[in-house]
């Protein structure tokens, strides 16, 4: 019998995931041994795979695309963050055997921006590009930082309006956006494919930080476009990945990892 705690990340595809490497670095900080595996699942088998994982002694799981909505639905309990997001990226086995779903994506984004990048959000004007699940998952944690304003813009304006109503923020059509934002966050999925949100280049003028929730081996298309259009600084989402993982690790084990050296190590590796 192996007493080493077992964790895993479920997704499809999953071979690219950096989560095992990240969590082993966290475990080294804590001074413990853990097992952390990639688990490929299929849409019609995800619920069974999760049940089998926890029945077999799994202590906690991360969930990535395309299973985050299912993860929130199959849990016995959901956190306020997971309910607001309508999705979960973290599953925790409680002492009574029940499964709690949580969502650490938003606090991962906020932690990377405020702590690793040293950019406070209180009183700032924030523009969010995109209105999909990735954006929905980060809006409440951003609001909790007390920004002056959050504006959401999306190619399909109706989707932006729906999210804006849910969270009590503003929605604007992409072609009507003006500059004056302190932080611009790209939550669309096209950046790694070379696509950038269709917004006027002038929107980036005077922006202190343009942040892409996606990340790659080099600057993303969004980062490049934002810098050329006048953004003072840009960042990709590698730090967000590490910080959301750290929040998951803390939920599972009660230990808060230091994310900065992990971000630095991964940045050198890509």
Image (spheres, rainbow, N blue to C red):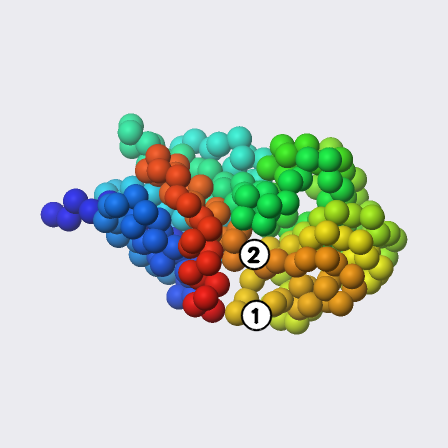
- The residue located at (47%, 33%) in the rendering is 78
Find numbered disc 2 in the image and state the secondary structure of the residue it sits on.
loop
Relative horizontal placement of residue 170, taking residue 107 as reference (left or right): right
Find numbered disc 1 in the image and state the secondary structure of the residue it sits on.
loop
Query: Hey, which quadrant is residue 86 in on the image?
Result: top right
Indicate the position of residue 228 as horizontal and vertical percent values. Answer: 76, 67
Indicate the position of residue 137 as horizontal and vertical percent values. Answer: 58, 43
Indicate the position of residue 16 as horizontal and vertical percent values. Answer: 43, 66
Classify mark 2: residues with Cα within 10 Å, few (<14), some (14-19) or many (20+).
many
Indicate the position of residue 161 as horizontal and vertical percent values. Answer: 77, 43
Q: Is residue 181 visible?
A: yes
Task: Please state the total of marks drawn on the protein image.
Answer: 2
Give whichever of 14, 214 is nearer the camera: 214
Relative horizontal placement of residue 151, taking residue 106 as reference (left or right): right
Residue 85 bears which disc, if any?
none
Q: Label 1, label 2: how many angstroms apart (C-alpha)?
A: 11 Å
- The residue located at (37%, 46%) in the rendering is 61
Q: Is residue 45 visible?
A: no
| Residue labelled with disc 2 | 237
Query: Hey, which quadrant is residue 139 in on the image?
Result: top right
Residue 218 bears which disc, if any?
1
- The residue located at (68%, 35%) in the rendering is 122
Relative horizontal placement of residue 60, taking residue 152 as reference (left or right): left
Q: Of label 1 and label 2, which has the lower sequence position?
A: 1
The residue lying furthest to the left in this view is 1
């Amino acid at each position: 019998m192996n007493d080493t705690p077992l964790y895993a990340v479920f997704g499809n595809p999953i071979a690219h995931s950096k989560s095992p490497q990240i969590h082993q670095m966290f475990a080294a900080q804590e001074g413990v041994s853990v097992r952390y595996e990639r688990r490929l699942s299929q849409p019609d088998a995800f619920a069974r795979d999760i049940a089998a994982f926890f029945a077999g002694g799994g202590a906690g799981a991360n969930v990535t695309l395309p299973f985050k909505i299912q993860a929130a639905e199959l849990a016995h309990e959901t956190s306020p963050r997971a309910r607001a997001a309508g999705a979960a990226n973290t599953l925790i086995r409680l002492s009574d055997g029940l499964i709690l779903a949580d969502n650490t994506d938003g606090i991962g984004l906020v932690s990377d921006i405020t702590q690793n990048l040293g950019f406070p959000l209180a009183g700032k004007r924030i523009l969010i590009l995109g209105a999909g699940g990735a954006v929905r998952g980060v809006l409440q944690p951003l609001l909790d930082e007390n920004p002056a304003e959050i504006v959401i813009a999306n190619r399909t304006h109706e989707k932006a309006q729906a999210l804006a109503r849910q969270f009590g923020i503003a929605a604007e059509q992409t072609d009507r956006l003006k500059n004056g934002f302190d932080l611009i966050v790209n939550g669309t999925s096209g950046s790694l494919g070379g696509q950038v949100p269709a917004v006027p280049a002038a929107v980036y003028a005077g922006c202190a930080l343009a942040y892409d929730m996606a990340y790659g081996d080099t600057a993303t298309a969004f980062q490049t476009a934002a810098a050329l259009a006048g953004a003072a600084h840009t960042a990709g989402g590698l730090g967000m990945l590490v910080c959301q993982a750290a929040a998951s690790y803390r939920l599972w084990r009660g230990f808060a990892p230091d994310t900065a050296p992990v971000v630095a190590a991964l940045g050198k590796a890509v």
